[in-house]
Image (spheres, rainbow, N blue to C red):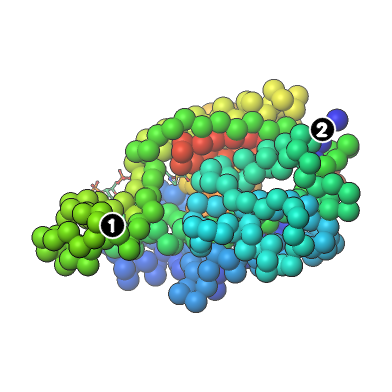
Amino acid sequence: MKGMEIVGLGKALPGVRLENEELKEYMDTSDEWIRTRTGIGSRYLCTGEESLTELASGASLKALKDANVRPEEIGLVICATCTTDYMVPSMACAVQEILGIPGGVPAFDINAACSGFVYGLQLVNALMRGGDACRGKRKYALLIGGEQLSKMLDFSERSVSVLFGDGAAAAVVRASEEKRFYCHTAAEGDRSALYAHTVGRNQIPESAYEGRQVVPENPLQIRQETAEKILRDGYLQMDGKKVFRFAVKALAGEIEEMELRSGICAEDIDYIVCHQANVRIIDYVRKQKKLPEGKFFMNLREYGNTSGASIPLALADMKEKGLLRPGTRIFCVGFGAGLTWGGCYLEF
Ligand code: ACO
């Protein structure tokens, strides 16, 4: 059997926790609006002194400790993120360096936005089974989901910035002959529903910031309107209604997909751990499928939407609360920008 199991989990959060009420200082919003439309009560945000590198390596250290695994035993490092600190090298290589994971094993990042952790699990399984990762004494994989979404939020714009938070969580994973694992991932290219450009500030003439007519200052000859678009699109843009419709369809579809693959119906599964985007998305699907409250683990009230970090953060919290006991069976479902989505079945 080509199974796989998570043997350790760890999380790291930034130092600042911002309540809904505190956002009123920066924009015209209210705790009531945010709570009723999203279920979010607070979020953690990196201060100027904190970075995703710190969060990702902090979460990884805790996951290794939880699994009782040494850096020398890691045979693969993958980081799922869409908010990397460096264009090069990858966050995975940065974590490898900081944790002292010896060289000679693959380390790289993936970007599947909020589906990143599910995509990552599928990749880990494929590389362990079909590739030659995690051989001999280095049989464990380190999979990180980490985001610093605050990098791409415009805090003067209320409809998107209230939804997101920063954080990281990591899992230590190994192949297993006893624990079953199934996974499915998919995408449908759509650049309008949810996107943020890389800003490329070094390419934007200074005059664009001051609203002056641009005199081309470099060989790229960037025009004023292009410079303004680059600046605006560097912030996360979202068509909320379109994303809502996509998300409920993806979540319901992946639950059905996992029911088929695992042979276990959603009523009998212990927990559904889905991307923590919005309580209304989860409630809509829960009611549609006539599932009881409590079937879906939720922590978005505290963290907001942390994109690729949200599923591993939920798993880490569940472990802390003693909800992941031997024999616990769960469906995980991710959905997000791309558009990407995916589900997996995990046994503990
Ligand atoms: N505070 C107060 N008022 C606000 C805020 C805010 N933070 N944001 C928007 N409003 C106002 C709008 O200006 C608008 O006012 P108007 O009627 O006077 O024009 C009104 O509230 C309604 O705005 P809508 O955008 O229509 O609000 P909607 O009910 O669609 O809710 C939301 C917005 C919560 C984003 C919703 O579309 C949604 O749940 N979408 C799903 C997308 C999602 O969850 N994305 C998360 C990231 S995607 C992912 O992770 C896959």
On-image quarter of the C terminus:
top right
Q: Quadrant of residue 163?
A: bottom left
> Where does the image place residue 30, in percent across and percent down from the top left?
34, 61
Residue at position x 63%, y 57% in the image:
92
Q: Residue furthest front?
A: 219
| Residue 2 badge | 2
Q: Is mark 1 within 8 Å of ligand 1?
A: no
On-image quarter of the N terminus:
top right
> Is tag 1's residue or tag 2's residue first in the polypeptide sequence?
2
Q: Is residue 314 left or right of residue 278?
A: right
**Proximity of marks 1 and 2: CB atoms separated by less than 8 Å:** no
Residue at position x 72%, y 25% in the image:
261
In the rendered image of this protein, does residue 177 appear above or below residue 278? Answer: above
Viewer can see residue 330:
no
Identify the amino acid type marked 2: Lys
| Residue 214 badge | none
Which secondary structure lies at badge 2? loop
Between 186 and 88, which is closer to the camera in this rendering?
Answer: 88
Q: Quadrant of residue 245?
A: top left
For disc 1, the marked residue is 231
Q: Is mark 2 within 8 Å of ligand 1?
A: no
Between 283 and 235, which is closer to the camera in this rendering?
Answer: 235
> Where does the image place residue 5, in percent across and percent down from the top left?
80, 44
Which secondary structure lies at badge 1? helix
Q: Is residue 134 left or right of residue 277?
A: right
Q: Is residue 152 left or right of residue 157?
A: right
> Where does the image place residue 284, in percent across and percent down from the top left?
49, 35
Between 182 and 40, which is closer to the camera in this rendering?
Answer: 182
Residue at position x 73%, y 57% in the image:
9
Identify the amino acid type marked 1: Leu
